[in-house]
Structures are given as C-alpha cells and as structure tokens.
Image (cartoon, grey):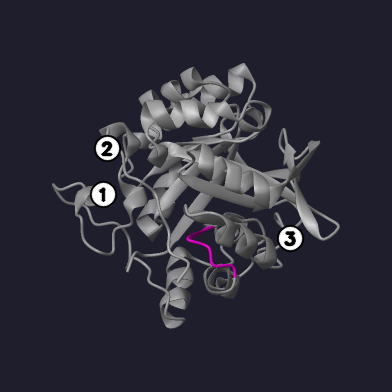
Amino acid sequence: MLSRRVIVCLDVQGARVVKGTRFESLRDVGDPVELAERYEAAGADEVVFLDIAASSDERATLLEMVSRTAERLFIPLTVGGGIRSVEDVSRALQAGADKVSINSAAVARPELITECAVRYGAQCVVASIDAKRSGNGWLVRTRGGRSGTALDAVEWARQCAELGAGEILLTSIDRDGVRGGYDLELTRAVSRAVKVPVIASGGAGSAEHVVDAFRLGEADAALVAGILHDRVATVAELKNAMRNAGIAARIGPMPTSNVDPRFRGDDETPLSVIPAKAGIHVPRTRSNS
C-alpha cells in the first residue's frame, strides 16, 4: 500500500514565509530554507514553496531560495506562484524543484498543462485549484483568490487531469487558515472525479483533521502549514494519528545514507517522490478503493 503523504506548505513573500487566514492578514513565520530543513528532519514527505506575490522580483527571489533549499533536501520540493509559461516551469526545475504548481495561468490557457506534461512529464505538473463555495458547489478563483471565475471547481479538476496534470492541489479558500478542518465535501467530490492524486489543502487545525482528509475526504495527501508553524502539532503527531487510524504513513524522518531515499523502491515510498528532474516519466493513477 502506498503511504499517504503529509506535505508542508511554505507561503513565501520576499525572503520570508508568511501565513494568513483566507489568503489575507499575513504574518511573518520564518526563513524558508530553515523551515524546509526543519520539516524534513521532522518527517515531512514533501515541501511546497508558493510565491504569493509572484512579481518578477519575487520570482527571482524564490528561485534563489529553491536552489539553496534543493541542495539540502532529500524530499520532493514543489514550486508554485507566478508560473505562466513552459519557460517558467523550466527555470523552476533547473533551480532544483521536483514539481511545479500551475494555477491562474492554466485557467487563462488550459493547454499550458498539456505543454508542460508533454515536455517534462505529468509527474512534475501539479494543477493548483483555489476553490470557494458558491451555492451547492464551488467556483474556481485565481490570482491568489482575488479574481472570480465561472469555472466549477470539480469539473475544472477533471479537465486538468485530462489535460495531463499529475496531481491536483485543492485549496478551500473558505477554510484556509481557519483551522476548523478541511472542506471534506469538496475534497471527496474532486477525489472521486479524477484518477490522479488529490492533495487536500486549507483548514487543518489538528491531527484529527488530517486523518479526516484521508478517511472522509479520500485525499491522497494533506497539506499543512499554520499548525506546524505555530507548534500546535508536529509532523510526528500527525503521522501517529494517521497510523492509529489505519492510514499508511512513512515512519519518521527520511533517512540519511549514501543512497538517495527517493529511489529506494520499497512499498512505503510513494511514486510522487521520484523527482521530475531525473527524467523519469511516471504515469499517475490513484485508487478509489
């Protein structure tokens, strides 16, 4: 059985990690490189850097951080925010990212997902979807949640997967930073609509919420941020709760040895840890069982 993943999200603005509520009221949390190393040592399965400013200057700053971080991490590193072209994806991968998250640019030009998947492999293309409840469903929002669209979030997730995205990073704007739990209805709807891994994001306030994301939301991975930054919970506590609930989780921090643990090939190593820059194309499928 493939392990479910605990992914730490670092929202980066300038040279610092910040955290807010519903994409607003940002506060400083710490240094991105130091936090990435700390969370890897604590047992996180992956790290995501999201450039929430995404101007040209921020992009240069973030890629420099990616390069410094990639030199030290063994776990996969995803970079997102301000990715607008195949060339942007190339620069992120060359800086050391294993995956690249695409959001607003994919909504504006959906074929960008296919272009990136064809050139670099579906395993490195993450379709990031920011969804906000509207009536009985959810609509996609772009530009950091500031711009609305008429796109149904579930249908857009299905389209992203069909276009070639290897994963869906699904964030509930309504739940982001509130710590009341993930939007399980949204997560479950998307998980059942696509055949690629779905990452639940927005709302984790406890280990029980992470367990619910897997058990009730049917997610393949859970993105966490604030509860770790504020030391409300630790990665170990999240994984202990998962195992106690019968959910497969990698045990402890990634080991250090002469063999890159991303290539061990044992059953506890998810396919997602195979880095895109290794040039390996891994078809992404998931089971709804």
Which range is magenta?
Answer: 217-222
Q: Position of residue 163 (x, y in %)?
A: 52, 37
Please report the residue visible at 39 percent of the width from the left and 55 percent of the height from the top.
Answer: 45
Assign a secondary structure to mark 3. Answer: loop
Q: Is residue 19 visible?
A: no
* Magenta part, dominant SS: loop
Q: Amino acid at mark 3?
A: Val
Residue where numbered disc 2 is placed = 280
Q: Position of residue 148 (x, y in %)?
A: 81, 38
Q: Position of residue 201 (x, y in %)?
A: 61, 55
Q: Residues within 10 Å of mark 3 (few under 14, many from 20)?
A: some
Tag 2–tag 1 contact (CB < 8 Å): no
* Relative height, residue 197 to residue 58 (above, below): below
Q: Looking at this view, is 131 or 69 the one in front?
A: 131
Q: Amino acid at mark 1?
A: Arg
**N-terminal-most mark, 3 or 1:** 3
Residue 51 included in the magenta stretch of the image: no
Q: Looking at this view, is 201 or 140 the one in front?
A: 140
**Gap between marks 3 and 1 measured at Cα:** 33 Å
Q: Position of residue 234 (x, y in %)?
A: 49, 65
Residue where numbered disc 1 is placed = 262
Tag 2–tag 3 contact (CB < 8 Å): no
Assign a secondary structure to mark 2. Answer: loop
Q: Amino acid at mark 2?
A: Ile
**N-terminal-most mark, 2 or 3:** 3
Name the side, left or right, on which 52 lies relative to 120.
right
Q: Which dot marks residue 178?
A: 3
